[in-house]
């Protein structure tokens, strides 16, 4: 059996006296669609940050694509094929939308493939990605001209531009309308069909349930459930965690 | 080799006294940078301004410089509040404080120095007070009053500040604004107003620090530049927003500087604070009392 | 315009400037022009790290003076042609810039800036205590009577600084349009997002610091020959720090044109004010302009003028 794409063992992270992650272990197989849910403050974003290298975990190991990535910086992890979108969009304000997408193309996708995309090819790829998220009309505009929702889409497009093997979507759908959520889900499904592994972190249960093949629940820094979505939501401990909100 | 114990003893004592003074000088940065995250590199300029005001009043009216600085506290507070307002409207609100805020403060630092040169020239100025000159002597150890008095008043100032920050509502709001602005808003407290008050207090401390400075040593416009490295080194070593940490770091720095000055020459003093800053940033950015 | 084409154009412009200047029979023009050209180099150098990456360096004077003092040190040992001194000055300042960057660039930009400020004071202390280069008394460097190529020594210095300015501008523009320039912009905009997009931020920042330092050192290398007498007070003058920040801010920090405009305008203004009023008032004006522009027109002159040109919004 092929090794899992992502293998997290006993990951722990503390901030001063506060334990944000307490020995979290989890595996993700290649091509899987994993949903990650949990109440606010449960450590979901901290987990993402530790996986992606924005934060450093004190204990535990992470293996990505067979490589032990402990100690690797964020940009090195992205180049290995791990991309994420930020919960609060962080666009490059002084660059146009096209240029925003050009960055991961130049610094991640290019580096991994070893080839240098020609200027024309790069422009094409940027246009293609913007089209996928419905922002191609604003290709030459700047992030400040975007609505909150459009910035979310830009976030996602930028993560996709890095040509990842694993895409972590951190609450990309908050505040979106019903049809917009459908759009994003369709997009993620398309990516999944192409073989990209996706971790979807969301509060919108409908989206998570319809998308995920497997569901993981995080509460107070600990993983309390991991399995088939239908089974997980019926788990009494999970119910307690959410009803207790 | 017989170690010059009296020289060593005096160096340490001078260092302790200097440290107390450095604590007052840095307290403003502890508030502005440590708590409010405002990189006010112009702080030494306000201190020198305080020195010169003390000088003017002292030379014209013969009043005690430290008393003058206490009288000047409201004016410096108002100045600080005004500067923060400009800073907030122009930079903080737009998220531009990294490049432009720094350039702004640097400009202020520079303008202050040049104006002082234009008005007062580059000659050293000093004040006269009854405690400048005499020393308390304990055997071979001398305690110059011109250093002892500022040191004691400095520590008093720090104590008052610490009580203010921990025991009063506004003081605690100031500590809180660093951590959670939203929570403050939910308590119907305007975080911008709190920051303005805090920055005003920060600059007010400069008035007194300036008076201490000119009591301890003669002053000329470029003296402020040496202090930039010192105050930030002390603030970082002290753990950023901690006044007790600032005192410990200040005393430590004072002693090492005094030691260096005594045995290697006074011109190496700036190198000491810079070395401390680099070491702290490299090995323990959370400071001595690390958070 | 392709970069090598631009370089050729810039060289041509430089050559034209020099040829035209030779028509002016007044040596003062060359003395003043040297200063303006020097500021073009300093402003452009500062902007590579400050404007493109968003990291403010307050220690321009230190890196500049290190270039100057390397020249003094070598000259005392054995006089050597200026182009060699420029290379050495550039290397020295590049290494120091790299060093300070390596120690502080992993941390916030604010710590880097504070460190550069403190560094300036420390390097000045070191040089002031180094008797070989004259210490606080200063050092005399005799200007040779004859200059290679052009005869008059001051014209030679002018030509050298002109060449440096052309080089600095060409490099700045090359960076701006390259992958490196995009990387720098992301560091300025959002470093965390940059890392997440695969940009090796630390490496890029170190490149910027090294390049910036190198040019500052190169600009300083000919200084001892220009002034004839160099002491720490003038070599480390705060005027260099404030000007290298004010000129890009006033001109515009996002492009190579900004520092050029700022240096030419502000540099010429200063020459005039220093001669007609005083050097202290001159510095005051620079300081006020810096603060004024940073508050009111943060994108500089380029930022004010750009909206006047229709932007392609297709």
Image (cartoon, coloured by chain):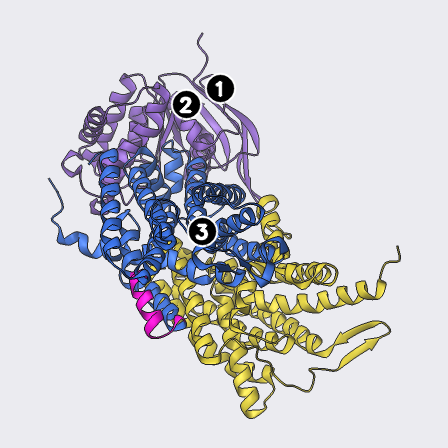
Chain colours: A purple, B yellow, C blue
Residues flagged by tags 2 and 3 on a common chain: no
Can you give x and y, in whole percent of width and height, for residue A172 in the image? Answer: 30, 35
* Marks 2 and 1, how far apart at CA: 9 Å
How crowded pointer 1 is (Cα within 10 Å; few <14, some 14-19, many 20+) is rated as: few
Q: Hey, which residue is sitting farthest right in the picture?
A: B2
Judge left or right: residue C52 versus residue A66. left
Q: With respect to residue C233, does B275 lie above or below?
A: above
For numbered disc 1, what is the local secondary structure? Answer: strand
Q: Chain of mark 3?
A: C
Say whether residue A56 is magenta: no
- Where's the C terminus of chain A, which quadrant? top left
Q: With respect to residue C151, does A111 lie above or below?
A: above
Can you tell which mark lies on residue A80?
Answer: 2
Mark 2 vs mark 1: which is more N-terminal? Answer: 1
Q: Which residues are magenta?
A: C266-279
Q: Which quadrant holds residue A48? A: top left
Can you give x and y, in whole percent of width and height, for residue B228 in the image? Answer: 53, 61
Q: Nearer the viewer, residue B105 or C241?
A: C241
CB under 8 Å between discs 3 and 1: no
Q: Hey, which residue is sitting farthest bottom in the picture?
A: B61
Can you tell which mark lies on residue A67?
Answer: 1
Residue B43 seen anywhere in this rendered image of the structure: yes
Can you give x and y, in whole percent of width and height, for residue A99 in the image? Answer: 25, 36
CB under 8 Å between discs 2 and 1: yes
Prevailing secondary structure of the magenta residues: helix
Say whether residue C273 is magenta: yes
Q: Which residue is mark 3?
A: C220
Q: Nearer the viewer, mark 2 or mark 3?
A: 3
Q: Nearer the viewer, mark 3 or mark 1?
A: 3
């Amino acid at each position: 059996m092929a090794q899992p794409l992502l293998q997290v063992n006993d990951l722990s992270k503390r901030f001063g006296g506060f334990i944000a992650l307490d020995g979290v272990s989890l595996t993700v197989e290649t091509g899987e669609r994993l949903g990650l849910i949990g109440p606010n403050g449960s450590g979901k974003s901290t987990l993402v940050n530790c996986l992606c290298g924005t934060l450093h975990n004190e204990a535990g190991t992470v293996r990505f694509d067979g490589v032990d990535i402990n100690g690797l910086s964020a940009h090195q992890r992205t180049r290995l094929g791990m991309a994420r979108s930020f919960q609060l969009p962080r666009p490059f304000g002084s660059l146009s939308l096209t240029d925003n997408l050009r960055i991961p193309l130049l610094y991640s996708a290019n580096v991994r493939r070893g080839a240098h995309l020609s200027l024309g090819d790069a422009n094409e790829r940027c246009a293609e990605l913007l089209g996928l998220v419905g922002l191609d009309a604003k290709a030459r505009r700047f992030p400040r001209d975007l609505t909150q929702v459009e910035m979310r889409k830009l976030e996602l497009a930028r993560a996709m531009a890095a040509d990842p093997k694993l895409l972590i979507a951190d609450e990309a759908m908050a505040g979106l309308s019903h049809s917009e959520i459908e759009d994003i889900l369709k997009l993620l499904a398309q990516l999944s069909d192409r073989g990209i592994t996706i971790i979807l972190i969301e509060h919108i249960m409908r989206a998570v349930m319809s998308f995920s093949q497997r569901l993981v629940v995080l509460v107070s820094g600990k993983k309390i459930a991991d399995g088939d979505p239908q089974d997980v939501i019926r788990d009494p401990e999970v119910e307690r965690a959410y009803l207790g909100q | 080799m017989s170690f010059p114990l009296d020289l060593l003893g005096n160096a340490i004592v001078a260092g302790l006294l200097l440290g107390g003074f450095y604590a007052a000088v840095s307290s403003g940065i502890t508030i502005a940078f440590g708590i409010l995250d405002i990189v006010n590199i112009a702080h030494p300029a306000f201190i020198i301004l305080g020195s010169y005001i003390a000088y003017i009043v002292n030379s014209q009216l013969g009043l005690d410089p430290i008393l003058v600085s206490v009288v000047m506290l409201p004016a410096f507070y108002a100045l600080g509040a005004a500067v923060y307002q400009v800073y907030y409207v122009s930079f903080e609100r737009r998220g531009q404080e990294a490049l432009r805020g720094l350039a702004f403060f640097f400009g202020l630092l520079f303008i202050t120095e040049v104006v002082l040169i234009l008005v007062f020239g580059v000659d050293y100025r000093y004040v006269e007070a009854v405690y400048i000159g005499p020393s308390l002597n304990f055997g071979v150890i001398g305690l110059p009053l011109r250093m002892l008095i500022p040191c004691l008043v400095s520590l008093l100032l720090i104590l008052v500040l610490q009580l203010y920050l921990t025991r009063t509502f506004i003081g605690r709001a100031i500590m809180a604004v660093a951590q959670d602005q939203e929570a403050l808003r939910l308590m119907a407290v305007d975080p911008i107003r709190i920051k303005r008050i805090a920055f005003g207090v920060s600059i007010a401390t400069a008035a007194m620090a300036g008076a201490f400075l000119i009591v301890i040593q003669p002053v000329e416009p470029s003296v402020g530049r040496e202090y930039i490295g010192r105050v930030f080194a002390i603030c970082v070593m002290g753990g950023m927003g901690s006044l007790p940490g600032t005192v410990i770091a200040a005393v430590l720095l004072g002693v090492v500087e005094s030691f260096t000055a005594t045995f290697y020459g006074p011109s190496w003093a700036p190198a000491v604070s810079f070395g401390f800053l680099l070491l702290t940033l490299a090995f323990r950015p959370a400071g001595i009392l690390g958070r | 315009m392709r970069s090598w084409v631009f370089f050729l154009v810039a060289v041509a412009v430089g050559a034209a400037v020099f040829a035209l200047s030779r028509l002016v029979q007044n040596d003062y023009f060359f003395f003043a022009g040297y200063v303006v050209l020097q500021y073009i180099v300093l402003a452009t150098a500062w902007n590579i790290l400050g404007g493109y990456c968003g990291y403010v360096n307050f220690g321009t004077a230190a890196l500049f003076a290190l270039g100057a003092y390397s020249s003094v040190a070598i000259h005392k040992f054995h006089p050597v042609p200026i182009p060699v001194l420029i290379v050495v000055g550039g290397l020295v300042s590049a290494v120091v810039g790299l060093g300070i960057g390596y120690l502080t660039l992993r941390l916030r930009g604010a710590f880097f800036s504070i460190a550069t400020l403190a560094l300036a004071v420390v390097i000045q202390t070191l040089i002031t205590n180094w008797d070989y280069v004259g210490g606080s008394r200063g050092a005399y460097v005799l200007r040779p009577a004859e200059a290679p190529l052009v005869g008059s020594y001051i014209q030679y210095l002018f030509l050298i600084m002109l060449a440096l300015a052309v080089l600095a501008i060409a490099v700045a523009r090359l960076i701006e349009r390259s992958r490196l320039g995009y990387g720098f912009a992301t560091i300025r905009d959002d470093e965390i997002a940059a890392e997440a997009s695969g940009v090796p931020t630390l490496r890029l920042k170190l490149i910027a610091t090294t390049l910036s330092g190198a040019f500052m050192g190169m600009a300083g290398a000919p200084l001892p020959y220009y002034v004839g007498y160099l002491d720490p007070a003038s070599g480390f003058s705060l005027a260099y720090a404030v000007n290298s920040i004010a000129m890009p801010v006033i001109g515009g920090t996002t492009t190579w044109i900004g520092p050029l405009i700022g240096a030419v305008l502000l540099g010429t203004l200063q020459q005039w004010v220093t001669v007609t009023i005083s050097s202290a008032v001159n510095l005051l004006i620079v300081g006020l302009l810096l603060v004024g522009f940073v508050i009111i027109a943060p994108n500089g002159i380029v930022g004010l003028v750009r909206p006047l040109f229709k932007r392609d919004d297709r």
